[in-house]
Amino acid sequence: MTSKSATRPKGVAVLGSTGSIGTTALRVLDRQRQRFRVTALTANSNAALLKEQVRKFAPEFVGMVESNADCHDAWKSGTAALVDAATREDVDIVLNAIVGVAGLDATLAALEKGKRVALANKETLVIAGDLVKKVCASGSGEVIPVDSEHSAILQCIAGRATSDIRRVVLTASGGPFRDWSKDRLETATIDDALRHPTWRMGRKISIDSATLANKALEVIEAHFLFDLPYDRIEVVVHPQSIVHSFVEFVDGSVIAQMSVPTMELPVLYALTHPERVVDDGVPPFDPIKLSPMTYEPVDHGRFPALRLGISAGIAGGAAPAVFNGANECAVAAFLAGKIRFTDIPGAISSALDKLGGLASSSREDLLAADAAARHHVKEVFKC
Ligand code: NAD
Ligand code: MG
């Protein structure tokens, strides 16, 4: 006999529902209505799209951080709306698809309430990985990654102990500038940088993919998610984005997870893990059509942000928060036309030199490090 509660669809809060991952998640959730019910939606400022989503999913709670004239009266406003959505009784899973440090508090609050956080907002783990782990260890909250590389690692590990793993290898597409010379990179425009070869994503992560800062964030994310030291996490460029990560086990066997590049699969898996459910969101796998699959090393000379991020991760403490804050600020300045593409790693490096040793024992320390890094970048680049 199946109990009523066992068959009840799980309540899902989608934070950042109007973004690239948010809209992808709603496509998945629309197909999976028997298993999941959207009980809360939040966005930053796109009221028109949020209204459309509310009409379609009829959630109990709607939050819009920057309220404006187009918002419905019943919608909650301000940043508190994110935590309100993430901690509701009718929410079992919080899909955090907010971009940047703005996603941190909702993740922590959801975990404190014992929820599953399906985490796209990798910045949460980069800024506050130790804190997130502490909260998970002290209750029933859990983080399941949405990032495709980490979803791949989770699927490859399939419950095995960390001691069974020799190393993990994250793949990177190489971004739009994979073939660009160092000199040509000096001329990169905003449009050039946003033209990602294999993924359609939000603007911030698209720039991060072009600098490879995204891969640095992902190495730190993998360190915290899978309890692996940095010398057991590697990166290889794989331009086709079919293999999402490799896991090499201690006996030398390597397991990889593959699919055509779509975020629908890692979103779905973060909702259903450890189960797999029937879904038709991913086009069929055809190794002939998808071949050749190629691999090349990262050119750290042209893409210094990756090593900067790994050093910040190894340094620990507030250094990853400084890395992230400086990067967020520099990317915003680049997207506003205030600095050049090649200034981004310089901004990160300068912030890490000055602030990498800041204290990090609390959320407040980490947010102070984030703010200091932004302030530093703005001062140095007058942006
Ligand atoms: P996006 O810019 O398309 O969407 C961001 C969403 O967050 C929007 O709904 C926006 O309204 C909301 N938002 C932005 N600023 C906010 C704020 N200050 N407060 C509250 N809400 C805010 O970004 P995206 O590409 O969907 O990425 C979201 C997160 O997922 C990022 O952390 C990114 O690194 C990660 N991620 C994205 C992809 C992808 O394919 N797009 C893949 C892996 C991981
Ligand atoms: Mg990724």
Image (cartoon, rainbow, N blue to C red):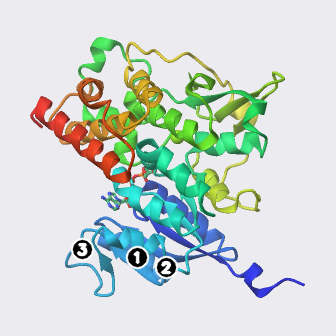
Q: Inspect the image, locate mark 2, and give the three-letter code of the amino acid beneath it.
A: Lys
Marks 2 and 1 close (CB-CB < 8 Å): yes
The part of the image, by quadrant, that contains residue 37 is bottom right
Give the left or right position of residue 25, taking residue 202 as reference: right
The part of the image, by quadrant, that contains residue 240 is top right
What secondary structure is marked by label 3? loop
Q: Residue at x 36, y 38 (%)?
A: 318
Q: Which residue is mark 3?
A: 67
CA distance separating discs 2 and 1 = 6 Å
Question: Of callouts 1 and 3, which one flags the residue occurring earlier in the amino acid sequence?
Answer: 1
Q: Which mark is residue 52?
A: 1
CA neighbours of label 2 inside 10 A, class few (<14), some (14 to 19), many (20+): few
Q: Which mark is residue 56?
A: 2
Q: Residue at x 75, y 56 (%)?
A: 274
Q: Inspect the image, locate mark 3, and give the three-letter code of the amino acid beneath it.
A: Ser
Disc 1 vs disc 3: which is toward the camera? Answer: 3
Q: Inspect the image, locate mark 1, and give the three-letter code of the amino acid beneath it.
A: Glu
Q: Position of residue 83 (x, y in %)?
A: 40, 69
Look at the image and tell me in which quarter the C terminus lies. top left
Marks 2 and 3 close (CB-CB < 8 Å): no
Question: Of callouts 2 and 3, which one flags the residue occurring earlier in the amino acid sequence?
Answer: 2
